[in-house]
Amino acid sequence: MKKKLKKIPKFKSENEERDFWHSHDSTDYMDWSRAVQARLPNLKPTTTSISLRLPVGLLDSIKIAANKRDMPYQSLIKAWLSDRLRTP
């Protein structure tokens, strides 16, 4: 027997909606067995600038490696960091 779902109320603000979902179980309002995964291909990750102090020799080596790959050195650093985080 299917559970009768409650109607989701109208919210006056995002804060009101946030408070509502913080104190209510979504399974009373939605049938998650029928949910489909959303694909949002045009979203870009939020980025933030950081300051990173590196020895001059290390930075020069990174720039040389990036130049060999024909890419900006900042992109190479991001790729290396990302790859390292994925490696156990």
Image: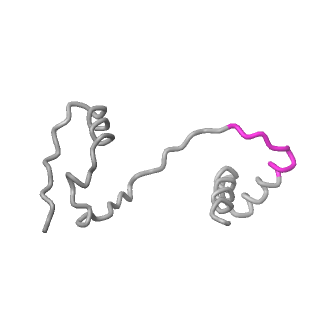
Left or right for 26, reference 55: left
Q: Position of residue 15 (x, y in %)?
A: 31, 32
Q: Tell me what residue is drawn at x 53 percent, y 43 percent.
A: 47
The one of 54 and 1 positioned closer to us in this rendering? 1
Q: Position of residue 14 (x, y in %)?
A: 29, 34
Quarter that holds the C terminus: bottom right
50 w.r.t. 81: above or below: above
Q: Tell me what residue is drawn at x 27 percent, y 32 percent.
A: 16
Q: Tell me what residue is drawn at x 70 percent, y 52 percent.
A: 73
Q: Tell me what residue is drawn at x 21 percent, y 60 percent.
A: 31
Left or right for 14, reference 69: left
Queried whether the magenta region covers residue 76, the answer comes back as no
83 w.r.t. 60: above or below: below
Q: Position of residue 2 (x, y in %)?
A: 14, 65
Quarter that holds the N terminus: bottom left
Q: Position of residue 22 (x, y in %)?
A: 33, 40
Q: Quadrant of residue 56?
A: top right
Write down the region rendered in magenta.
51-60
Queried whether the magenta region covers residue 57, the answer comes back as yes
The one of 25 and 44 positioned closer to us in this rendering? 25
Q: How many numbered circles does the render carry? A: 0
